[in-house]
Image (cartoon, grey):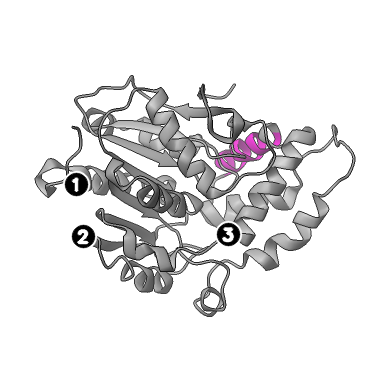
Amino acid sequence: MPNTKTVKVPHLFRTEAAYQMPRPYDATKPTCVLINSFTMTSDLYAAQYKNDKLLDAMNLIAIEPYGHGQTRAVTDTFTYWDTAIMNFQVLDALGVKGKVFALGTSQGGWIVVRMALLQPHRIAGIIPLGTSMDYESERTRRLGNFNAPETLTKPIKDLESKDPTPEFVMPDYFREFPIYTGFGKDIDKATVDFWWNEYGENYKGDDGRKRLKECSINLRDRDGLHARLFEVRCPVLWLHGTNDLAYTIANAQEEIKMFVNSPDARLQTVEGGQHYLSASHPEVIDDALIQFMSPKLGILCVK
């Protein structure tokens, strides 16, 4: 049984958007939106939901992107920009007031940047984790980042079907690479089993095949953000693990410098941190988030 609730929003003709809130919304606290990585769910942030210090300091609202978890649209076609728009509509539907912070892992990182571009007056700061701002460029290959075309082109082709596929189950390779790339090669068996089963439930039948295909196309064929980073005017705290198997520290070091109009753009490396930093080093991430959102930084949290 998913831990999420759903709310109806109008984007993409009608959407049932799934979200998790570990505590009821408190308008006296700042709010941080959490966005999960490729094919994961809002349970990626399970450690954060258990941290009373974090929950005492802020509202946490994890929103599952299009194609992920329990979020459903009436169309099979969507992009990262659509998720960014949907996120604001979810906040509106939940009655969230004032500016919010937004944290995103991997694809969630470039989604929160899109949020800062689309509605800058509503974003107090962004916290990308283990991410990239580039498309699948020659530059990204040179810096040793995850090669989406190489990994996904054949699997995307395999997901194509003219006929309904009610018996579809998520192939093993689609489960293995996010799990082991994200959590690291030394991941414990209980975590592997949890996500293996979660994938089996989330991506099955004809609907599951279509959503998995579109998510994979988005990752492989995404547009880069380099030319748009000039317009990001909020603070940026980029956290990146030294053991990240998807995107490199060298990439993060180059790209944090592209936020030239952010009043405070910082890269914080996490020794031994994996691609899914919120899971591998939750205490480090939670403490950094509290400090970043602290009123002493002069960031307006609630209006």
* Residue type at tag 2: Asp
Magenta stretch: dominant secondary structure = helix
What's the mark number on residue 222?
A: 3
* Residue type at tag 3: Arg
Image position of 151 (left or right of 185)? right
Q: Earlier in the sequence, mark 1 or mark 2?
A: 2
* Residue type at tag 1: Gln
Q: CA distance from mark 3 to mark 2?
A: 27 Å
Q: CA distance from mark 1 to mark 2?
A: 13 Å
Which residue is nearer to you in this view: 66 or 89?
89
Q: Earlier in the sequence, mark 3 or mark 2?
A: 3
Residue 157: x and y, percent? 80, 56
Residues tagged 3 and 2 counted as in contact (Cβ below 8 A): no
Is any atom of residue 204 visible in this view?
Answer: no
Q: CA distance from mark 1 to mark 3?
A: 32 Å
Disc 3 crowd, CA 10 A, few/some/many (<14, 14-19, 20+): some
What's the mark number on residue 264?
A: 2
Residue 40: x and y, percent? 56, 42
* Residue drawn at (54%, 37%) of the image: 41
Image position of 282 (left or right of 220)? left
Q: Quadrant of the N terminus?
A: top right
Which circle, 1 or 3, is nearer the viewer?
3
In the figure, 221 relative to 37: above or below? below
What's the mark number on residue 291?
A: 1
